[in-house]
Image (spheres, rainbow, N blue to C red):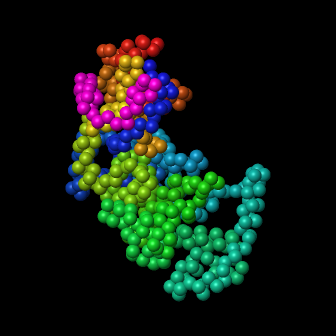
Amino acid sequence: MITCEAIFVLCSLVIYFKMPRIYFDTNVFSKLKNATEEKFIQLNKLLAESKKNLTFYFSHAHIMDKLKDQTVNKFADFDFMESFTTDNYLSYDPISKRTHQYLATPLMVYNDNKDGGYSLNNFFNKLNLNPDRDGSSMAVKSLMDSYMAQPAHIDPDILKKSTTENAPMLSKILPLELDSPSMGDMIDKQLIFYDDIIMGSESYKDLRKIVDEAFNDGKFILGPEGDTAFNEALKDSPLEKPFLKFVFDNVTKDKEGKAEYYNYYQISYYSLDLLGIKKDTINRKNGVTNLLNDGLHSYYAQYCDYFVTDDSAVRLKSKALYKLFDIKTNVLSVEDCISILGQIGKDTEVNMFVFFEKLSKNVRDGIRDQETTVDGRTSSVIWVAEIYFSFFNCIMVVQEEGFTHYFLRKSITSELSAPNYREQGSIIDRAVSIFGPDIFDKSYFDFTKEVEAAEKGEDIKRVWRIGSYIISVNRHEGLQEFCIVISPLNSIVHNS
């Protein structure tokens, strides 16, 4: 039996193929629900045939898109979205500073966020500091009051140095009407300006015009496929540094000098617009909140394998940033999605005989890569054109002591590549449909019971004896990932 130490040596074997984990932005869900355009009618038909073999996710961005909807229509939208995503939810946790997968439906998340929004005044109101509650609140309030009273130190000649055209914008940002403004005055002014930008379009367009003319002035743009030449080209602009370096230098960092990735990515997305590299049309219907939410969709979609959007600007920006950040997600138009859905959404195994025939063919004819031999143990990876159980996309082959073991694995394309409980259940159900109940007479996945047990530390697992092989599906101790292992029965007896 392969030791844990040996498996850790093999963990670096990573193959990048795309799996059927799909992220639709809000606009795609909306147009699918109404389905008046021919391409969405066609997409709906294809999804009806292949949805069972695909996994769909929604995110915090979808909920933010619906917060401004004051009608009851949004609840029907949530129901439609849930018919695809079930409770596969992605959200960023500001405490752990990581993005996580959660089990929550769109309506559940909306009910938890319906009083939220992009207003900074909402944020400050929710602090609700009560000096009578405890000593720490009193200390925080005292520090805030002290900070707010500090002088703002604004250059008195700043208006003289600005152009006549820029002066009104500066007056919106800075409390220039006051002789001796405090930091509190500065924050109050900027809170009003921030809300003005979020709620209206003209202030943002004025700000973008100033920034664009100062640093870009139409010289640097995105190419038709999200070309990234602008990144290095901006070194020849007044920025005097590549685009990503400019953004990195202007985001908050920890004491080790590392930028928080969530902020780094989103500010990069918004900066493409602000610098005029790829401008969105900003108006009353498509305001700044839409731009902010587009950036959120682009961020969360990277944790899926396909990002489908009908917005060409979102596609171009996402393609460019995915290249710059080395993100493996495919960005698709609706037409692109239609063209590949039949392939990625098809049944991958019909029965046991088809499974073993496919495995034998891939092992025999597949291209082997990263072959290594350590202490008499030979390992290699086989690239496969087809996937297994609608999830696994490569085969790791390990030979030792005269026995050959096969590991069906999924390539690691992000920190959330591992299957969530829904996906683990789907894999087990597919395996049971092919191999039948396992040697412990365990059959299809009992979601409530098995997830509850898993939360207490028990393995989600099935084991079959098929002829002279043992097949197991579970989180492998050595690999530390959910996979399928196929080993000769004799090797288990030999090492027991």
Question: In the rendered image of this protein, does residue 5 appear above or below residue 294?
Answer: above
**Residue under the image location 36 percent in, 28 percent down:** 397
Looking at the figure, which quarter contains the N terminus? top left
How many marks are shown on the rendered structure?
A: 0
Q: Residue at x 53, y 57 (%)?
A: 263
Residue 106: percent from the left, percent from the top? 44, 47
Q: Position of residue 177 (x, y in %)?
A: 64, 82
- For residue 81, above or below residue 234: above
The reply to whether residue 362 is in sight is yes
Q: Is residue 197 magenta?
A: no
In-image side of 90 versus 353 (left or right):
right
Q: Residue 458's spot in the image, x, y percent?
A: 51, 25
Residue with the most extreme right position: 135
Near-viewer residue (182 or 214): 214
- Residue 46 spot, x, y in % from top left: 24, 45
Asked if 109 appears above or below 455 in the picture, the reply is: below
Left or right of 263 in this view: 381: left
Visible in this render: residue 50? no
Q: Is residue 208 left or right of residue 139?
A: left
Give the left or right position of residue 317, taking residue 5 as reference: left
Q: Give the quadrant of residue 413.
A: top left
Q: Residue at x 42, y 77 (%)?
A: 217
> Which one is nearer the viewer's eye here, 466 or 58?
466
Q: Foreground residue, 112 or 415?
A: 415
For the point 78% across and 52% down, which residue is it?
135
Q: Is residue 366 magenta?
A: yes
Q: Which residues are magenta?
A: 352-379
Q: Is residue 206 above or below residue 252?
A: below
